Amino acid sequence: DVNVLVVDTEMYSNTGGQQSKATPVGASVKYAMGGKQQTKKQLGEIFMTYEHVYVASVCLSNQTQLLQALVEADRYNGPSFIVAYAPCIQQQVRPDGLTDMFDECRYAVDSGYWPLYRYNPDLIVRGINPFILDSKKLRKEVTSFLKREGRFINLKKAHPEIADDLFHKMNTDVHHRIELMLNRASGYKAFASKEEATVQVLFASETGTAQRLARDFSDACTLSHGADAMDDVDVDDINGRITVFFIATCGQGSMPQNGKAFYDSLCRRTEPFDEGTSFSVMGLGDSSYYFFCKAAKNVESAMLKLGAKCLLPMGVGDDSCEDGMEGGLHQWLDKVWPSLELKPPEEVPHIDPVQMMFSNRAILPEKLDTRSVAQYFDSVNAVSVPILNITHLSETGHNRDFLAFNIDIGGTLSYEVGDALEIFPTNDEERVAEFLHSYSSDFDERTVVKLNHAFGINGEISLGSLFCNVLDVFGKPTMHFLQQLATFEADEDKRKTMLDVDNLKKMSVEKGVTFADLLLQYKSAHPPLPALLAMIPPMKARAYSIASAPSASPNSVELCILIDTYWVEEGGIRFGLTCDMLRKMHPGDHLRCRIKPGSMEPPSHDQQVVCVGIGSGLAPHMGFLRERVHAVTVLGKEVATFSLYFGNRFERREFLYSDELKKYAVEHSSWFKLHTAFSRDTIGKKVYVQDLVAITDDAFVNLFSNPGMLYVCGNRNLPQPLRDSLKTCYQRLCTDGNHNAEAVVEDLFVHGRAQQEVW
């Protein structure tokens, strides 16, 4: 498992710039002043012939592809070989030398001089083409690249005829090489040419997620030739064809870099598309951001304006949903296959079994078991911290239990105002033991296995500890899990039931099924233990916003937590995994935690602030407020105005931190204003926090008349009505003639003056 990075300067840079086998044809360098006659030796393509070596060609101009290649090479269990283009001073880059490094790299890639690709042998065993060409479209002529470097310019000046011949040879070689790579990249589909494919799959991806999903979809779609970056095709190429888009959103609603040129061309186009042009869009994003899936929405709108037919409404993959983007993706896939008149592909999921062996030990000493559990938590950077105290913030006996946890982090963790604390849940020991006994007679919670660096553990651990601390066996199962489980089921009728998406949805609503429930229900499938450990995902840490301020409480954090419950038809009330653990804990108990940087940038003391929070969404606002109170009372600083809008259902039962907030409202009335709305207390008409924002002046004064900050925290039903209320407030008080409230409110988000955390 050796990883090699070759930094290719295309000459002997450390001895004065002599020619080498890496020097390209036509370059005028030492020992080849008349221009090198032979073509360059392509190391990456040589290593690909071994077929068991991970190979990539990378360049700074595409940092997403560069990072993806490095991560894949590190994960690959075998030799990896990455070649990186690295201009050196001897190339005499014009006009600005090596300060123009990024543009130099961009010209090299866009002209085809330095193609970007990845060859991943892991894909072969999954029946997927291992060769991925990441730069398919030549956007510039090779000569435009050659004219930027003295090593080529000098030959043109000294020997123009020789230079013309060699440059022509390079141009031919580049186009021939790209053609070969394009053929290799599409080699697993039975199309004589790309034009024979009736479905075109395009992606715009910033981090690689949209690209991966597009390529997975293309591999599964029998009508698709492959997946391309949007910028690798012309708008005319989709005219008269079916196109499926996978589009991420980056920054403040921006299009990813590899989709910008295509989208600009789409917007400039005035001629309608031909009949038969149809499309579907899968948008990826995070609904906690104002510009959720904006890039995908923009493409859908532009296609419709040009007369293209939309096959089905845009699919949405939302990272902030409980199921992540996969939930929305599978809902969209269920509809897209029929719209393409295709039978959904029978998925045979790839399972990488966990590397493990059964130990000869009958029982593992507790000390060794604890040490292995610590290895896992060390691998996820979680530390053990004690609970100092737990306070009920809501009325005792009320059906919604809000708790304040005060946790000692002295000497182990440090945090900033606005950060969150991620808590790792654990499964109940008795419940784990009961499941293991019911599932198999071959092993139980005492069985000892030896792991080879799986889950960060290298050594022996009991199955009880593994299932209690690592595996989410009582979590909500996905369709992907059932597809994996079905590969071990011999009975065709059972397999059909397992692969029925509607059946899983029904069981989730009626019974709230877990991974454990499905494993027991379909016990005959019974995957081997190494596969089972790979199929059950690790438990995810749950993030809770910190309600304390580090300036006032540097050695402890306070969390405001609503104990999460949900209803299932055949089981009544159920508790979320982490909340079920927390509700049973007492002062002195320990939690496994880590700090997660906050998604909202905290305000400075001289910035006006408007905070809007509902329920436990009050937590980060309490952190901001306590930080400001400490600055005034302890440090003697002057601070700008701070308006807090807090809402919940009942004032008597759910006015969180009521005594503290009322005290601040009196003692710091010169700069702090408190507005509360309790929706279930008003008979006939419910009043929400957004209603108060619309009828009070604070938002206009602090946000529209001054460059203040808006912070929003609550469930996903809050942001849109709040934005409507902000527009109402602006329109009510604006006197300067600018009544474009939509643009004014959007400007808050564009310039980062409005930030939100929603779930």
Image (tube, grey):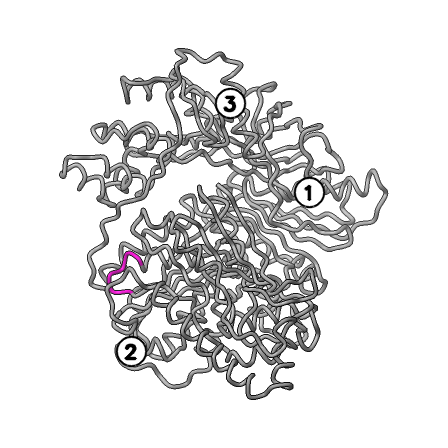
Query: How many marks do you count on the picture?
Result: 3
Closer to the camera, 121 or 491? 121
361 vs 332, nearest the viewer: 361
Which of the numbered marks, if any, corresponds to residue 417? 1
User: Spatial distance from mark 3 to mark 2, Cα to Cα?
Assistant: 59 Å
State the residue lying farthest toward the front.
31
Quick check: 283 left or right of 583? Answer: left
Q: Contact, CB < 8 Å: mark 3 with mark 2? A: no
User: Label 2: how many residues lie within 10 Å, few (<14), some (14-19) or many (20+)?
Assistant: some
- Across and down, in percent, residue 729 comes to 60, 63
Q: Give the percent coordinates (x, y) of residue 743.
A: 58, 70
Residue 431 visible somewhere in the drawing = no
Q: Amino acid at mark 1?
A: Val
Q: Is residue 223 magenta?
A: yes
Could you give the CA–CA distance between mark 1 and mark 2, rounded to whole angstroms?
A: 54 Å
Amino acid type, mark 2: Gly
**Gap between marks 3 and 1, in whole Å?**
33 Å
Q: Earlier in the sequence, mark 3 or mark 2?
A: 2
Q: Position of residue 78 (x, y in %)?
A: 44, 43
Q: What residue did someone put label 3 on?
A: 372
- Measuring 51% from the left and 43% from the top, which residue is drawn there? 2
Expressed as whole percent of the image width and height from the top left, the position of residue 373 reads 51, 24
Residue 333 drawn in magenta: no
Image: 511 above or below 64: above
Report which residue position mark 2 lands on.
240
Left or right: residue 520 versus residue 416 is left
Q: Which residues are magenta?
A: 219-224
User: How dense is the environment of label 3, judged by Cα within 10 Å: few (below 14), some, or many (20 and up)?
Assistant: many
| Foreground pick, 661 / 687 | 661
- Tell which residue pokes out farthest to the bottom in this image: 161
Q: Indicate which disc residue 163 carries.
A: none
Quadrant assignment, res 279: bottom left
